[in-house]
Image (tube, coloured by chain):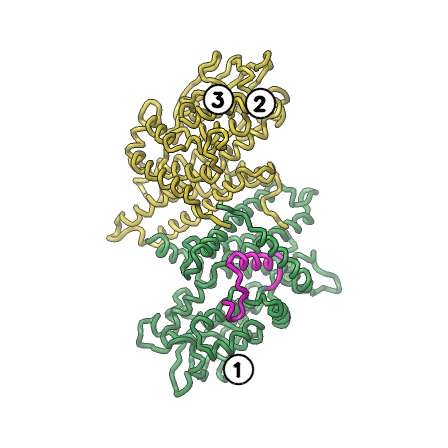
Chain colours: A yellow, B green
Amino acid sequence: MDFSLTEEQSILKDTLGRLLGDHCSFEARRAHLESAQGWSQPMWARYAGLGLMALPFPEATGGDGGSSVETMIVMEALGEKLALEPYLTTVVLGGGFVRLGGDSRQREELIPAISEGLLKIAFAHTERHSRYDLSHVETSAQRDGDGYVLSGAKGIVIHGDSADKIFVTARTSGNPRSREGIGLFLVDVNAEGVSRRSYRLHDGLGAADLTLDKVKVPASAVFGDPGSAMPIIQHVVDIGIAALAAESVGVMSAMQALTLDYLKTRQQFGMPIGSFQALQHKAVDMYVAIEQARSMALYAAMMAEEADEKERARAMHAVKAEIGRSGRLVGETAIQLHGGVGMTMEFAIGHYFKRMTMIDVMFGDSDHHLRSLGKLGGLLDVA
Amino acid sequence: MDLRFTDEEVAFREEVRAFLRENLPDDMRKVVADGRLPSKEQLRSWTRVLKAKGWAVPHWPAAYGGTGWDPMKQYIFLEEMQKYPAPQPLALGVNMVGPVIYTFGNKEQKDFFLPRIIGLDDWWCQGFSEPGAGSDLASLKTKAVRDGDHYIVNGQKTWTSVAQHADWMFCLVRTDPEARKQEGISFLLIDMQTPGIDVRPIVTIEGEREVNEVFLTDVRVPVTNLVGEEGKGWNYAKFLLGNERTNLARVGASKQRIARIRDIAAKEMVDGKPLIEDHRFREKLASIEIELKALEITQLRVIAADMRRGNTGKPDPASSILKLKGTELQQTTTRLLMEVVGPHAMPCIADGEALGGEPVGPDYAAHAAPLYFNYRKLSIFGGTNEIQKNIIAKAVLGL
């Protein structure tokens, strides 16, 4: 058992850390946030230059052959600086769909475009009544010659405002909550019948509601079996959960660093407030929660490519439940220990707290995953 | 990064399991599964089985009887012992005083005591806490005054676990009342047969005698029983308390208890169905299992880090979490074990007792509440969890 990084992985971590340190300070990030797009095109180009976009693709397809460990390294670093660029949706999720669901022609077309940073992708799944149920899909896909016609509405499509293409789940058969009969389609945002309403989320990320009004998609836009794409969707969501876990560790580590710094410098009653035991114990609670979360992010990276669907599902339920709990404890405590200034937009801590809060509700919150893990009979390998 | 066990480690795990199946008597297994302490005779006979196999003190240096296993194998061994569950050799000897003796003791002490610890020829107890020295251990008052070739020891120790069985006590005493409080302390080995020692029971809330008060009145201890240097006892005590890392979290024990909880929950009924099928119960259990999984990986991280840099004696910062979280989880699982037996947790009737020939309640119920009561100790002894937090705040967070 070895938890250490290879030399290449260490270089990746250091290089990306330096890049973000140089170009994604809190002030620089604020400027990116306030731009019309809400994130930085130059940063995006720098990531591509560093090879981050090609990371998860097999070498045979022009990728870098990276594993879930590389994705973990990148996501943690992005989390630590609250990077705004659509890496998760484009490379981890979009790239995941292409990698796991695309045929050779789709891979050949899309992987180079993603790798060079020329394509931005989003994932449209959530509907008005789906909540966190992946199987709940009402958007319909009707057979039309070689292709399909998509109709329906998707909400909270993260980075859907700036994406060039969007992976859409739509039902080809079955009732609205059936696991079977769900297809996966890659829709061009400029296709006829696609309309978007864009807005920002509380963490500053852009998003969109998507309306599909008889949108015609060709056969080349169908990923996987149109009658049964759920295994692919599930796997990519699991990979997304592992990525969010890593991002969370970055977010939480930054919150801890900011909080410790504040505790050591802020003076009251003639001494640093970090000398007070009540506050010290809260800081230790944060630390313990972060280390537990870090362990779960490692577990997630280990399980993200697990072939046994049920084992992977149990692991990811556990991971997401733990990340949500740790994140809430760390975030709320960080704000509390900052006192009044923690409430201000001026200070970074609140921005981290908001990102952490959004991460909890993405792909299902703690309660959802705890409930799901309970249904599967729990985590423990009792043997 | 590779988070899998090697083939060799997997094979070793099987070897340990097979050994336990073939060698541990069922009655002893049941005692441990119930969360009770084995009797002195039981523990001694089991320790000698381990000794014969060469497995009584795996973590010791090979020169003193250790197996030479790396920390991961030691961890696997302990985890399998806890999961089976099998009694572990007396920690007071093999984990506490033993390492102090082989690290700081002289040749005579090593030659005499170490083999006797390995075979549990001597039962050890720990004379650290005093009525006025708990979390602030360094304020201890028991004094040892030099008189020729002896120290004359006077004072009172408390919370002395299993002292009623003890042949020897390792004891912190004040040899220099003038020195700064940590510097006037020495580490003495005291024969419990020496005149002037009075062991009195303290009955704890679960109803058992696990701890004692030990009164020392003009107890004559040969100077040859001083470990290391006079006045350095505090350092040895800190070494002793910080020495244990591979198994601080006791993940295997919590796994075993969760397996037991699952078994019982399959037998207890709620709304006409087994409790294990109840959603709320399942979520509660899942929640604990998640915490335990995270802790297990944290424990493995600490071990892997130790192995990578070689044991420098400096713990990984994450190791400070192990006691905190490990004790919390052990307490949580004992609480859940009590909850799962439901109203059958109530009768205060010891194992094997029967009223008019009829057993009271199901056979798994009797020890659930006593164990829950008893395990409140885990966050108190060895430095309370609040003291642990003070230590982490200072040493890890720099506050």
Q: Position of residue A280 (x, y in %)?
A: 36, 52
Residue B193 got which mark?
A: 1
Mark 3 sits on what residue? A109
Q: Position of residue A119 (x, y in %)?
A: 42, 23
Given residues A277 and B48, the one toward you in this image is: B48
Residue range highlighted in magenta: B61-87
Q: Against A237, is A323 above or below? A: below
- In primary-sequence order, the first of circles 3 and 2 is 3
Same chain, marks 1 and 3?
A: no
Q: Badge 1: few (under 14), some or many (20 or more) residues near its Cα, within 10 Å?
A: few
Given residues A308 and B280, the one toward you in this image is: A308
- Of the two numbered discs 1 and 2 in the rendering, the one whose residue sits closer to the viewer: 2
Q: Badge 2: few (under 14), some or many (20 or more) residues near its Cα, within 10 Å?
A: many
Q: To which chain does the residue with label 2 belong?
A: A
Judged from the image, the secondary structure of the residue bearing numbered disc 2 is strand
Mark 2 sits on what residue? A183
Residue drawn at point x = 63 percent, y = 72 percent:
B41
Q: Position of residue B103 (x, y in %)?
A: 44, 70
Residue drawn at point x = 57 percent, y = 67 percent:
B56
Q: Can residue A105 be seen here?
A: yes
Given residues A210 and A238, the one toward you in this image is: A238
Q: Can residue B337 be seen here?
A: no
